[in-house]
Amino acid sequence: HDEWILHDKNWYYFKSWGGMYHDQWLTLNGSQYYFRSWGGRYQNCTATINGKQYKFDASGRRITEGWEYIGKYRRYRKADGSLMEDVTSIFNPSSKYITVDRTRGRVTIYGYNSATGSYDTPIKSMICSVGNPISNTAAGTYKIGWQLKKKEMNGVDYKCWAPYVSQIYDAVYFHGVASSTPDLNMISAVDFNSLGSPMSHGCVRLAAIDAKWIYDNVSSGTTVRIGDNLDYPLTNPTRYTWTGGAFGSDPTYR
């Protein structure tokens, strides 16, 4: 009969005719196990198998889909073992908390977890451009103010229009990459492709689709913390591809 064998603190599984499992999955009594090339099973670890991440408990059983804590943050593990990087479709509470990491060029949105009474669940993250120098986007804690679908912006040496504007403080906003024309069809490829690097006059510049997410899903009064080297529990967010010439419309604009 098939059986488990423990040898030198590693578990192996042998078939009745003597063959040993290796480089393969085993489903047994409703649980899944995976055996390395030399035969020992994965256990109490996270492993990459054929390019996908899977987590195994202390008994070697694959941990299936659901919420779990990684450090102090609650993450959702998909059935294939990978972690969901945008949980908007399954967790999008009205109460949120936003961080802007100036050094990384990242915005992270957290949702309020009523079970713990804290903002311990990252919903999604976004690539952003803060001020150049970054001090133009002042570190501090603020509240989202008014929000507009489109806004004309005027400075000493510029005039432009930006989509999906959410005020952070004074004249510093979340907004999509600005256009030199009110129809939003003349944004710079350089500005778009530089998202992630300090480029703005002080605003937190985003791809239009991300600015729209904030416009649609974040309400006035939401806390925004701006700083450097803040916690970043997600991996790299989506970087969108520019599809035009030197100038054109944001490919993510809807």
Image (tube, rainbow, N blue to C red):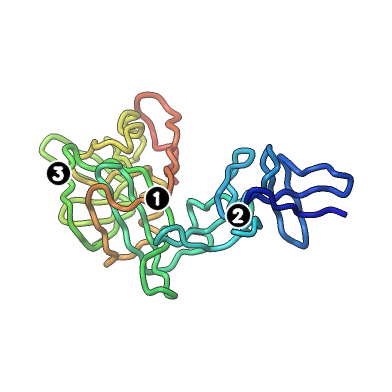
Q: In this view, does 150 lie above or below 94?
A: above
Disc 2, SS: strand
Please tell me which of labels 1 and 3 falls first in the chain: 1
Check residue 56 in the rendering and tell me which mark sits there, or answer none. 2
Identify the residue at image location x=39%, y=35%: 249
- Horizontally, is 43 left or right of 222 in the view? right
**Proximity of marks 1 and 2: CB atoms separated by less than 8 Å:** no
- The residue that disc 1 covers is 125
Identify the residue at image location x=53%, y=63%: 67
Percent of width and height locating residue 43: 61, 53
- Horizontally, is 186 left or right of 44 in the view? left
Disc 3, SS: helix
* Residue 148 picture quarter: bottom left
Identify the residue at image location x=60%, y=58%: 57
Q: Residues within 10 Å of mark 1 (few under 14, many from 20)?
A: many
Identify the residue at image location x=45%, y=58%: 70
Name the foreground residue: 47 vs 253.
Answer: 47
Point out the frontmost of discs 2 and 3. Answer: 2
Name the foreground residue: 158 vs 79.
Answer: 79
**Residue type at mark 3?**
Ser
Percent of width and height locating residue 40: 67, 45
Q: In this view, does 185 lie above or below 209?
A: above
Percent of width and height locating residue 176: 33, 44
Report the Cα–Cα distance between label 1 and label 3: 22 Å
Please tell me which of labels 1 and 2 falls first in the chain: 2
* Residue 133 picture quarter: top left
Point out the frontmost of discs 1 and 2. Answer: 2
- The residue that disc 3 covers is 135
